[in-house]
Image (tube, rainbow, N blue to C red):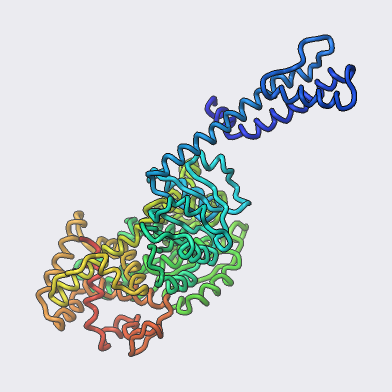
Amino acid sequence: MRNYWIGKLARSRKRLMYFLLLSGGILGAIGSYLYYGSQLSGWRLWLSVLFSTIKLYFFAPTIGLTEKYSVFYEIAKWLSPLGSLLGIVNAFGVLWHQLSYIRKSLFAKRYLVFGEGESAYRLLRNLIRENNGVGAMIAGSDCPYDKSFLIGKGIRRLSSDLSRDPSALLREEMGGRGDCAVIFFGEDIENFKNMRLFHDRVLPLPGRCHMVLRSRSHLLQAMMERSIDSMKRAEISFFNMEDAVAGQLMEALCRREELFRKEAAPSDAADFETLCGAIGSLHVLILGFGRLGEAVLLAALNSLVCNPMENNHFTIADREVEKRLSELTAEYPFLGKTAELHALTADILGKDFLSLIEEEDRRRRIDIVVFSLGELSDNLILMERLKELFRGRIAALRIGDPESFSAFFENFSGYYGALIPFGIESRVLNTQCVLEDQRREAAMDFNARYHALSSEIVSKEGAKESRRELWEELSLLKKDSCMSQMLHKEMKERVLLHFLPGEEKEKLLLQKLKDWERKLQSLSPSKRTEEIERDPLMCFMAALEHKRWCNFYYLKGFRYSKKKDEEARTHDCLIPDWGEFLRSDKRDTIVYDLLASLSIRE
């Protein structure tokens, strides 16, 4: 309790200071007027009142204890000096933080964030804490954070319009060198404009500067990526917060053993069709279709592909969901080829919603429920109403702060089969996700393993280039493809573990991958294709990757053509039907599909 009041007093010290100064001045003026009013008049009276009141702030009252002494002046004798003392403490505190900032900035890495919202502040605060650095927030006049508050956190607040300012202040903030990280955390167009201006007017030639643009639209990001190839003085990358959250959710989902029902595991002698029938497909219910809901759907179209012969099913519930789904289909014209989509337009918190979901579950059993509404309270209310219906199912809950949800966790234990919290900002707004881009680094490692296996099995040559050189050789499309391939490896691993018999599945998985690798290395190209078709599990994994690959290219707007042309968005392997693909002249490329499964483990 004591710490609570101390903390509250510390947060309100500026308002308390203003109250003490103002009330002390008013009461001091009244008391002085009552004392001098009977003795003086005119300008002498007002000058005496002013002089007597001002001296209160300097701990030197002029009126002593007499019969004309006023109680107002006595109160002011205490309030005014206290206000002055608090002001001095505040001033020294700000000065101390300013000096500490200057001293620390001589050696620490600098972080500049263009943005003024809560997410921008939290990101900058996390970067400073994790790297013992200093930061600056470039914000407008309506920034909700006070300068003295920010400087106490190691953050300077600057106001700069790059289109008009000479940018000298920003150059000074960077210390005259480029060893810094700059994050543009506003809207897409504003971010791109500021990034171009910063690159042309502020960025110095020496040193290294990493610039990160927050993006919300995949289409705008693709357009911006094509426009930044000429910028050589900085490393430029993109960060989509919703995509990062959705990616972490997909990774958590694919690691759950409950993803596939245990009774569906086939026998060792099962053929390809039996494997497809045993694994089935997933039915995902997404409740709330804002930006995060869209990101979850798009991530699931890649990461949750588990059956090469059957699309996953998605039921999306929200108000005006059909309009939003129509807008999404306009951006991704072949969206309908990647999954079975069902829009459920309804008031999610309304009285009729439960019966609608019960009917949907009877029509096709729902395996995963994603609660992605904006407010935690709405998600909790909905979870409480649906917990009996979805007993034993996987539930994913959007939360901002894990401590806020922990108090309610016991309400759902014993109902949902698995409860996965996601959307925790501290897991996304950090150095690894924003600056180091964990997914990009993981994709580079995956691409290097894939290339090494391809060199050993297909071309019979050892890999000679470094992982970074291999990555830089890829086009933007190929980099995205490799990223999507890497994000699916958890699902491939979960499918293989589901099909393998016995208890020591991890050991069997490694052994299986090694056996496949040795077998393919010893065969000619034609024999490799025949061997993959002959082995049901090898064929299933190759077909699974081909299905995922087709989904990726459909989402990129590609269509089938005998001529492969990246500019025209056509590809000669875009044949989603596995039987038809094996009858085509591209059947010998299935070894490349299987290499994606061989690359899931080092």
Near-viewer residue (205 or 338): 205
Picture coordinates of residue 334 (x, y %)?
Answer: 45, 79
| Marker count (numbered) | 0
Residue in the image at 44% along x and 45% along y = 134
The N terminus - image quarter: top right
One can see residue 401 in this view: yes
Picture coordinates of residue 146 (x, y %)?
Answer: 59, 43
- Seen in the picture, residue 96 relative to 265 is either above or below; the reply is above
One can see residue 413 in this view: no
Residue pushed farthest front? 44
Picture coordinates of residue 565 (x, y %)?
Answer: 36, 85
Near-viewer residue (354 or 323): 323
Picture coordinates of residue 263 (x, y %)?
Answer: 30, 61
Residue in the image at 52% along x and 52% along y = 169
- Seen in the picture, residue 261 relative to 328 is either above or below; the reply is above
588 relative to 400 in the view: left or right: left
Residue in the image at 27% along x and 71% along y = 275
The C terminus - image quarter: bottom left
Near-viewer residue (275 or 522): 522
Q: Quarter-wise, where is residue 563 in the image?
A: bottom left
Near-viewer residue (515 or 299): 299
Residue pushed farthest left? 522
Q: Quarter-wise, where is residue 551 in the image?
A: bottom left
- Seen in the picture, residue 184 relative to 136 is either above or below; the reply is below
- Seen in the picture, residue 570 relative to 189 is either above or below; the reply is below
